[in-house]
């Protein structure tokens, strides 16, 4: 049974990815089945001739213009991406009402790494104060976004690898449910960097072609970049206007199995989904579809499939990974996919798992491969799985007030 606490509603959202800027451009790309993964152009790296990625197709200078920032000294690309979508998510909101307790919680994996090469080169060549010293703090983007928007209340940054943004969303929901905040901007931002690209390449889990999650012949992931934010509000605020949907459940678990891999038995993934179901008061059969984490790596997809089987059996709801559209945007991926989950509810659509061809030998489950119009997308479960086995599941529900 669902706990008797404050309900949490999503009142607005914003997003930027390799599909474009804003909710509408991303929705258009999902509907058209257009992948944003392609040649690396903005990040200057020798690997651009070998690898592809889901890169936002704007230079830092163009992002500065779009963001409207006046002073950009020491501001990272991740901060620019985050600010652009934070403004989209709050464009119709008065953030300066002192009677409304407002906070911001941001998830990121690589924010402080985007300029680390410049910092190191400068540090070795002179002893002057480098403009990117402050941005080595993982909370730098959070502080920049909060200052630009005028959010002076609670703020924090979460880094749990690829479940960072999902955990930021969960943390914000808990703050509202326990009457610590009335409204909180939650989500994540991450930009491509040489450190992350080289690191994943060294792990040999990057596919040189467009990734194919849950396919028998999957070879790995494609990195991406982007940001997304949801504005969560308490019931007393939402009743004053129309909300988009309800964040009805969430759950987090940790496999404690391996530094960079999920437990292959799927126990941790299953636990996160079961906790989210318990929090929401829903049963497994109530879930309309699953936005799977589905990176395209061998371990990740197998662990998630086994987790889905443990919770739903062989009669699982429709599921798909949207990472072949955007690439794996690391710490921000849970926020991007939260937006996609909400779009599924708003437009009654189940988005396809691009590039899937051959069923995995370990399971009978097959992801959806075409865009599915539906009249019954009421509850969407979104999974985010991070290094170290940090698993988070969120449940978004069609609005019922």
Image (tube, rainbow, N blue to C red):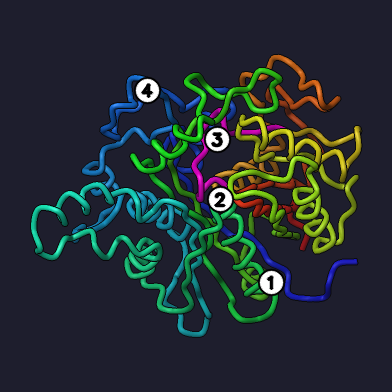
Of residue 238 and residue 231, the one placed in the foreground of this image is 231
The stretch of residues the image draws in magenta is 320-334
Disc ID at residue 235: 1
Q: Secondary structure at mark 4?
A: strand
Q: Secondary structure at mark 3?
A: helix
Disc ID at residue 76: none
Circle 1 packing at 10 Å, graded few (<14), some (14-19), many (20+), is some
Q: In the rendered structure, are the residues bearing label 2 and label 4 in contact, judged by CB atoms less than 8 Å apart?
A: no
Residue lying farthest top? 357
State which tag comes first along the sequence, 4 or 1: 4
Residue 61 vertical position relative to residue 43 in the rendered view, above or below: below
State which tag comes first along the sequence, 4 or 3: 3
Measured Cα–Cα span from mark 4 to mark 3: 22 Å
Judging by the rendered image, the residue that carries numbered circle 3 is: 27
State which tag comes first along the sequence, 1 or 3: 3
- Residue 14 placed where, x, y %? 48, 50
- Residue 346 magenta-highlighted: no
Residue 356, located in which quarter of the rendered image? top right
Disc ID at residue 39: 4
Q: Residue at x 56, y 24 (%)?
A: 211
Judging by the rendered image, the residue that carries numbered circle 2 is: 335
Of residue 116 and residue 285, the one placed in the foreground of this image is 116
């Amino acid at each position: 049974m669902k706990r008797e606490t404050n309900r949490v509603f999503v009142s607005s959202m914003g997003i930027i990815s390799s599909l474009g800027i804003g909710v509408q451009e991303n929705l258009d790309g999902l509907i058209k089945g257009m992948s944003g993964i392609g040649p690396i152009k903005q990040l200057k790296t020798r690997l651009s001739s070998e690898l592809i990625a889901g890169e936002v197709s704007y230079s830092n200078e163009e992002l500065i213009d779009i963001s409207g920032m006046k002073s950009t000294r020491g501001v990272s690309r991740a901060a620019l991406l985050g600010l652009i979508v934070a403004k989209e998510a709050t464009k119709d909101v008065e953030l300066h009402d002192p009677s409304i307790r407002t906070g911001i919680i941001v998830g990121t994996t690589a924010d402080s790494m985007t300029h680390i090469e410049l910092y190191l080169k400068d540090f070795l060549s002179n002893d002057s104060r480098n403009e990117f010293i402050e941005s080595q703090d993982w909370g730098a983007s959070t502080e920049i976004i909060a200052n630009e928007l005028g959010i002076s209340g609670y703020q924090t940054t979460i880094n749990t690898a690829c479940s960072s943004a999902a955990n930021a969303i969960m943390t914000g929901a808990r703050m509202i449910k326990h009457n610590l905040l009335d409204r909180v901007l939650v989500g994540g931002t991450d930009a491509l960097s040489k450190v992350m690209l080289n690191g994943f390449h060294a792990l040999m889990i990057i596919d040189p072609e467009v990734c194919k999650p849950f396919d028998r012949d999957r070879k790995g992931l494609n990195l991406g970049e982007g940001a997304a934010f949801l504005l969560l509000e308490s019931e007393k605020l939402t009743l004053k206007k129309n909300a988009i949907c309800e964040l009805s459940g969430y759950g987090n678990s940790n496999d404690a199995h391996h530094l960079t891999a999920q437990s292959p038995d799927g126990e941790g993934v299953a636990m996160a989904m079961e906790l989210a179901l318990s929090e929401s008061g829903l049963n497994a059969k109530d879930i309309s579809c699953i936005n799977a984490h589905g990176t395209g790596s061998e371990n990740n997809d197998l662990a998630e499939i086994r987790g889905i089987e443990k919770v739903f059996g062989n009669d699982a709801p429709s599921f798909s990974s949207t990472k072949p559209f955007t690439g794996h945007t690391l710490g921000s991926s849970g926020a991007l996919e939260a937006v996609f989950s909400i779009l599924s509810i708003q437009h009654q659509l189940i988005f396809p798992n691009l590039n899937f061809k051959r069923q995995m030998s370990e399971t009978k489950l097959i992801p959806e491969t075409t865009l599915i119009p539906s009249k019954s997308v009421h509850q969407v479960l979104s999974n985010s799985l991070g290094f170290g086995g940090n698993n988070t599941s969120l449940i978004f529900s069609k609005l019922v007030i």
